[in-house]
Amino acid sequence: MLTLRTPGRGVSFHEIDAAGLPERSFDVVFAFECIHDLPYPVEVLASARRALKPSGSVIIMDEAVAERFEPPGDETERLMYGFSLLICLPDGMAHPNSSATGTVMRPETLRRYAREAGFADVTVLPIEDFAFFRFYELIN
């Protein structure tokens, strides 16, 4: 585990495998641009949920693809499919029984993963014009 502390500010950052997250320990868990890469996203989200203090939050940042597939897709959508087919999807599928999500993770897919992990719902946060990214808060 890597711990970085900010003296006098009470903030620390931890790099740790999701399976080893201590229960009820964190005010917030962030997952930046990674859920779509994970072979087992539901298990990781369930670990994040268990690691939260009662009033804690999970914040996800992932690609801002269209809400649903509508061909031919805009430039961003086509770019994300390229990344998915050549990088993210093959990496995720390199593990047995992978969810095989890939870069083009629709909001409804994240919502399903979150509910399977025990969250009540997912809210899209009102953060706009942040490059290719969309922010979500998982509601406990």
Image (cartoon, grey):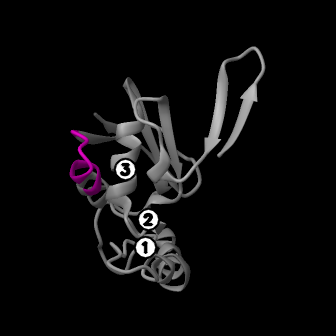
Q: Earlier in the sequence, mark 3 or mark 1?
A: 3
Q: Earlier in the sequence, mark 2 or mark 3?
A: 2
Q: Nearer the viewer, mark 2 or mark 3?
A: 3
Q: Is residue 28 above or below residue 105?
A: above
Q: 10 Å neighbourhood of mark 1: few (<14), some, or many (≥20)? A: many
Residue 46 sits inside the magenta stretch = no
Is residue 11 in sight in this rendering?
Answer: yes
Would residue 2 be found to the left or right of residue 41 on screen?
right
To which residue does mark 3 refer?
45
**Kind of residue indicated by mark 3:** Leu
Q: Are marks 1 and 2 in contact (CB under 8 Å)?
A: yes
Mark 3 residue crowding within 10 angstroms, few (<14) / some (14–19) / many (20+) = many
Q: Is residue 102 left or right of residue 88?
A: left
- Label 3 vs label 1, nearer the camera: 3
Q: Residue furthest right?
A: 7
Give coordinates of residue 138: x percent, y percent. Answer: 34, 40
- For label 1, the residue is 102
Residue most toward the top?
8
Q: Position of residue 12 (x, y in %)?
A: 66, 30
Q: Which amino acid, mark 2?
A: His
Q: Residues within 10 Å of mark 2 (few under 14, many from 20)?
A: many
Where is residue 42? Give x, y as percent: 32, 57
